[in-house]
Image: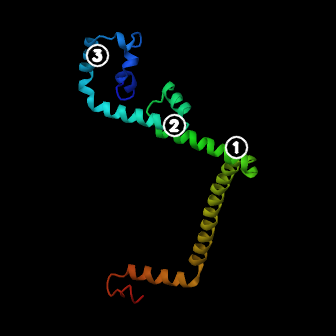
Amino acid sequence: MNLKKDLHLYFTVSVIFKEFDFSELKLEDLIHFSEIRIDSIDLLEDWIRYRRLEDIASNLGLGKFMLAIKNENIGDYTFKDLFQKRFFTLWLDQIYKNEPLLFDFDADAMNTDVTSFRKLDVKSNQLNVLRIKERLESNRIHAINSLAFRRELQIIQAEIGKKKRHYPIRKL
């Protein structure tokens, strides 16, 4: 038994002694019940707080919700998570009923559109890369073929070939 999740099984006397009437219970049985649970006394405060909150929730009209939670295997979720999920589901259902535009909204069609636009964006980016490469390549070829570039290249190669009396590169 997971003690933190099954506090009602651990601390509720009526659950443990369900076949007995309270008037028929022996004092020894109650003492034994108490001695076993004395090590978990700090959890008793949590249990009492839970019972108070459960009563408040029932008074606020959440009794069916609390009963459904008790009967479900909630796993690692908290009551808050489950309540918020249910609350927001009901809230959205109500909004969808009141707003025809949202009621007619097709999420599958929207997801299809988003997927197709993502694919188009990827293709567009690939085309832009190719356009930039072509433009740079044409500028490079034009620069290499220009007369000024050839003169500069010849001067630099001539200076590299010299063994003495180099011009400073800043003056070239």
| Element under disc 2 | helix
Percent x, y of residue 102: 71, 50
Q: Nearer the viewer, residue 103 or 15?
A: 15
Percent x, y of residue 114: 67, 51
Percent x, y of residue 123: 65, 56
Question: Which sits earlier in the primary sequence, circle 2 or circle 3?
Answer: 3
Residue hosting label 3: 30
Is label 1 or label 3 in front? Answer: 3
Q: Residue at x 60, y 62 (%)?
A: 129
Question: Which sits earlier in the primary sequence, circle 1 or circle 3?
Answer: 3
Q: Nearer the viewer, residue 24 or 44?
A: 24
Residue type for callout 3: Leu
Q: Distance between the residues labelled 1 and 2?
A: 41 Å
Answer whether residue 77 is visible to the viewer in this image: no
Question: Which sits earlier in the primary sequence, circle 1 or circle 2?
Answer: 2
Residue hosting label 2: 59
Percent x, y of residue 110: 70, 49
| Element under disc 1 | helix
Q: Residue at x 39, y 87 (%)?
A: 170
In the figure, residue 49 lies in which quadrant? top left
Q: In which quarter of the image is the N terminus?
A: top left
| Element under disc 3 | helix
Residue hosting label 1: 108
79 left or right, relative to 111: left
Answer whether residue 83 is visible to the viewer in this image: yes
Is label 1 or label 2 in front? Answer: 2
Q: In which quarter of the image is the C terminus?
A: bottom left
